[in-house]
């Protein structure tokens, strides 16, 4: 039912840039709803850094990590990266890293925590390692929280670009 509601969101009434960001909002909502195919249909037609970023998240969620990293490179440095890094560092500081059993994941998280910029490719590598090798329950929780934080920030950014104020997520 949620996919039907999302698909009914209008793209009308805006200029071209507003319509592009409205499509990004719909794509992000589909990701939030775990509707990867519907998000993909939209994001591959959004030729902006935000569209590329959404496209990358979709591929990361489906497990196509190399394709995800390609789209993250296309997105480049995105306005949500700094607040995302700040929130990720805060989450990792409050006890997220030391409970992780995988030394490889712990090392990558420490690398991200010490960085001055969000690294989407490094995060994709962490998710890949978690899914295919580590399967660490504590890492699973942390990485999912970071992914949802990333998606929430991207959704809010796209919504604000349409002229909206903010979303309560």
Image: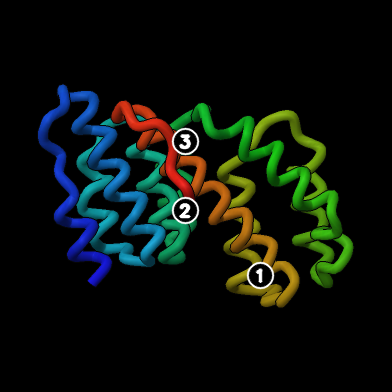
Q: Is residue 141 left or right of residue 63?
A: right
Q: Is residue 139 above or below residue 49?
A: below
Q: Residue at x 35, y 27 (%)?
A: 161
| Identity of the residue drawn at 23% across and 28% down | 18
- Residue shown at the point (33%, 38%) measured from the top left: 51
The residue under label 3 is 73
Q: Quadrant of the N terminus?
A: bottom left
Q: Is residue 41 left or right of residue 84?
A: left
Q: Earlier in the sequence, mark 2 or mark 1?
A: 2
Closer to the N terminus: mark 2 or mark 3?
Answer: 2
Question: Residue 56's spot in the image, x, y percent?
Answer: 42, 48
Dot 2 falls on a residue whose secondary structure is helix
Mark found first going from the N terminus, 3 or 1: 3
Question: Which residue does the image show at 46% across and 57% down from the upper left?
Answer: 60
Residue 66's disc number: 2
Q: Quadrant of residue 71?
A: top left
How far apart in space, not on screen, are marks 3 and 1 (Cα)? 24 Å
Classify mark 1: helix, strand or loop.
helix
- Which colour style is shown? rainbow
The residue pinned by badge 1 equals 140
The label nearer to you, 3 versus 1, is 1
Q: Are marks 3 and 1 in contact (CB under 8 Å)?
A: no
Q: Is residue 107 left or right of residue 59?
A: right
């Amino acid at each position: 039912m949620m996919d039907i509601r999302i698909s009914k969101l209008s793209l009308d009434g805006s200029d071209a840039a507003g319509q592009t960001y409205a499509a990004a909002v719909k794509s992000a909502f589909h990701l939030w709803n775990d509707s990867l195919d519907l998000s993909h249909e939209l994001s591959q037609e959004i030729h902006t850094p935000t569209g590329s970023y959404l496209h990358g998240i979709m591929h990361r969620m489906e497990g196509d990590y190399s394709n995800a990293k390609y789209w993250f490179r296309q997105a480049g440095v995105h306005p949500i990266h700094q607040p995302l890094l700040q929130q990720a560092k805060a989450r990792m500081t409050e006890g997220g890293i030391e409970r992780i059993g995988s030394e490889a994941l712990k090392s990558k998280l420490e690398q991200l925590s010490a960085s001055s910029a969000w690294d989407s490719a490094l995060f994709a590598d962490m998710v890949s390692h978690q899914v295919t090798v580590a399967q660490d329950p504590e890492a699973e929780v942390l990485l999912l929280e970071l992914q949802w934080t990333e998606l929430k920030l991207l959704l809010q950014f796209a919504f604000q670009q349409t002229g909206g104020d903010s979303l309560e997520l």
